[in-house]
Amino acid sequence: MIVKTHPEEVIKYCPRCGSKKFKTNDKGRSFNCEECHFNYYLNNSAAVACLIFNKEGKLMLARRAVEPAKGMLDLPGGFVEPMESAEDALVREIKEELGVNVTKAEYLASFPNEYVFSGFSVFTVDMAFICTVDNLEAILPADDVSSIEYFFPKEINMKELCSQSMVNIINQYIKRYLY
């Protein structure tokens, strides 16, 4: 069974007035209510991902403890909260997920992603940072991380990663720093 998760398949009523006359336009990128004239645009949500390496040059990957993609590999990180900078979100997410502090963060790249949660597609732009943390030995997986594992970037089985954007981020790192 194919579950349709795109917002135009899920959102059926105007969030302002409840009308069923809430229709998509702009090729499914926005909605307009024919009753109250409310406009809603499907903008990307911001998310951050952290590339952390041990002294051997192995990349830390997290096992997801929750859906979506429970059990798959992921880069530590998460959504940027309203009125929060990407850098602040990165520091907060790493503290929540790993219990350590980011001491240095260097922007790498960003890639689009479709994050399906509760039967609804959330479109994101995943911003990747190469990070240093204060104490790798003190890492304690928490929040939505069940465990951490280390891999040489070129040896990662990309099919085990939870999303195409994570594949793209790691491939960008390999292209930029390992070739």
Image (cartoon, rainbow, N blue to C red):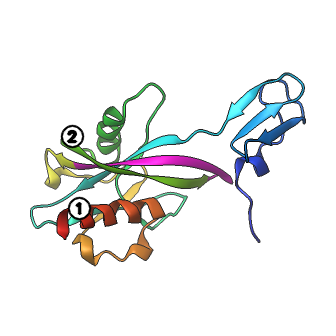
Residue 81 sits above or below residue 53 on the image: above
Q: Does residue 81 appear left or right of residue 86 in this picture?
A: right
Query: What label does residue 28 carry, if any?
Result: none
Q: Which sits in the foreground, 175 or 142?
A: 175
Q: Residue at x 73, y 42 (%)?
A: 26
Whether residue 95 appears in this view of the structure is yes
Tell me if mark 1 has few (under 14), some (14-19) or many (20+) residues whose alpha carbon lies within 10 angstroms of its own: few
| Quarter the N terminus occupies | bottom right
Comparing marks 1 and 2, which lies closer to the viewer? 1
- Residue 120 drawn at (x, y percent): 67, 50
Q: Which residue is mark 2?
A: 101
Residue 100 sits above or below residue 136 on the image: above
Q: State how far apart marks 1 and 2 are (Cα).
A: 26 Å
Query: Is residue 136 covered in magenta?
Result: no
Q: Which residues are magenta?
A: 117-130
Q: Which sits in the foreground, 2 or 26?
A: 26
Q: Residue at x 9, y 62 (%)?
A: 55
Element at badge 2?
A: loop
Amino acid type at circle 1 is Arg
Amino acid type at circle 2 is Asn
- Residue 129 drawn at (x, y percent): 28, 48
- Residue 76 drawn at (x, y percent): 34, 53
Element at badge 1?
A: helix
